[in-house]
Structure formats: C-alpha cells, structure tokens
Image (spheres, grey):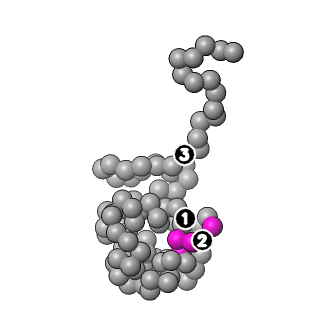
C-alpha cells in the first residue's frame, strides 16, 4: 500500500515534518515515527493507513505502485531501479 520511503518522500515534497504529517492525518506522532522507521511496506491498522493515504491524497500526493502508470498531471519523482554501472560516458574503453 505505502512504503516507509514513499512516506518520507511525500513529507519532503510537502515540506512538512513528522508532527505536521501526524496532525494532517489525525494520527499520533509516534505512529508516524513507527511508520517511517519501517522496513519496506508500512504495516499497521488498516484504518490508520487509510487516514495517512487519504490525507496525502488531499494534500496533492499521488502514491504510485511498482510498475504502475501515474494517473495525474503535475511534477513529481519516481524511484526506479538504477542503471548498471559501466564505463563513464565519453570515456575510452579500457
């Protein structure tokens, strides 16, 4: 549904801290802190997760699942698999 990385990135895009996110979502600060400290997908009470997702949506954040297309317009970022490293562009092969 949402990863800890997406949650931190969403907060950064909105320019808010964890306390402000908690207020925006109607959840406690320790709940937000636990969510952001998770490894991978955030787990928790479904109602709490839905509050967070809905609050982010109202604030203009579109959460994009793996391999899904963006449905909206506007600026944003997307994390993808990094390209394999190879010779630096413009350099001669060894």
Question: Which secondary structure, mark 3?
Answer: loop
Residue 75 appears at what percent x and percent y? 32, 49
Q: What is the span of residues highlighted in magenta in the rendered image?
A: 35-39
Residue under circle 2? 38
Q: CA distance from mark 3 to mark 2?
A: 20 Å
Q: Residues within 10 Å of mark 2 (few under 14, many from 20)?
A: few
State which quadrant residue 34 falls in: bottom right
Quadrant position of the N terminus in the picture: bottom right
In-front residue for pair 74/40: 40
Q: Is residue 38 magenta?
A: yes
Would residue 13 appear left or right of 68 to someone viewing this image? left
Name the front one of labels 3 and 2: 2
Residue 80 - label: 3
Residue 3 - label: 1
In-front residue for pair 21/91: 91
Q: CA distance from mark 2 to mark 1?
A: 8 Å
Question: Which secondary structure, mark 1?
Answer: loop
Which residue appears at 44% of the width and 86% of the height?
28
């Amino acid at each position: 549904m949402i990863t800890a990385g997406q949650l931190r990135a969403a907060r950064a895009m909105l320019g808010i801290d964890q306390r402000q996110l908690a207020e925006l979502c109607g959840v406690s600060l320790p709940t937000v802190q636990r969510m952001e400290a998770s490894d991978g997908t955030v787990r928790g009470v479904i109602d709490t997760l839905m509050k967070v997702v809905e609050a982010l949506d109202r604030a203009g954040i579109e959460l994009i699942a793996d391999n899904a297309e963006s449905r909206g317009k506007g600026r944003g970022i997307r994390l993808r698999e990094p390209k394999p490293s190879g010779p630096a562009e413009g350099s001669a092969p060894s």
